[in-house]
Amino acid sequence: MIGCYDVAKVYRQDGVDTPALRWITIEIDTGEHVAITGPSGSGKSTLLALMGALDRPTSGKLTVDGMDLGILTPAERSRYRFEKVGFVFQEFHLLSHLTVLENVLAPFLGRAGERSKHQVRAKELLGVVGLSEALTRPAGVLSGGEKQRVAIARALVNDPDLILCDEPTGNLDSVNGEIVTDLLKRLAETASGKTLVVVTHDPKVAGRFARQIKMQDGRVVV
């Protein structure tokens, strides 16, 4: 599903080039569940951002299902993210003044028809993550573990083929971290063909994945 071929990413500020990725070549198959590990600053999150078309490679080629993400127009990148990708971030990125259900349906803001069509699925997902009794609660009053479970439901509401998670347990205690990791793997396994890529520095989280891609200094080392 994902192909990275000699992918490099360089950030330029005040005339100074800072390499974030150095000639990455990896492939991830459809339906594969992968952990990307490494110390802070190793390029893990940068690579994930490129897979999600949140940024472009400086050089090289990155494809998803044969689509070259580096040459997409802004409108095509937006459509790709909406239709193909579910994101889960360390910081949750919930709207605290909206209810739990409204947050799960947030990807459809401004799309009235889509919003109503996905309401049943949103409620089903909230049931799966154990929050069926919290639909009308404001997101701002939830615990960290509850917020991340809402974020997982939001990431899956549009039935994406690719689930990208950037340190999804980073702001959670060990108990909630295990719950969230279990949920992600179980939901991805239940929905046949879902590809799951999780960036983590936590060896316990990484150990739950059969395949680990280890990075250091912008390179893949394993």
Image: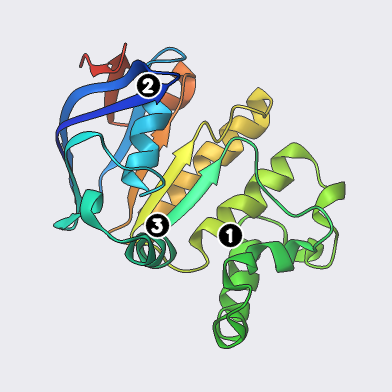
Q: Position of residue 198 (x, y in %)?
A: 41, 36
Which residue appears farthest toward the bottom when viewing the image?
A: 113
Q: Amino acid at mark 3?
A: Val
Question: Counting residues from the N terminus, which is met first, the one under dot 1 or under dot 3?
Answer: 3
Kindly identify the residue that appears in the image at 58 percent across and 40 percent down: 180
How crowded is the residue under tag 3: few (<14 C-alpha within 10 Å), some, or many (20+)?
many
Q: Amino acid at mark 2?
A: Thr
Badge number at residue 37: 2
Q: Residues within 10 Å of mark 2 (few under 14, many from 20)?
A: many
Q: In the image, which disc is placed on residue 85? A: 3
Residue 129, compared with residue 27, is above or below; it is below
Q: Quadrant of residue 193?
A: bottom left
Q: Secondary structure at mark 2?
A: strand
Instruction: Read off the residue under disc 1.
Output: 154
Identity of the amino acid at label 1?
Answer: Arg
Earlier-in-chain disc, 1 versus 2: 2
Residue sitting nearer the eye, 55 or 107:
55
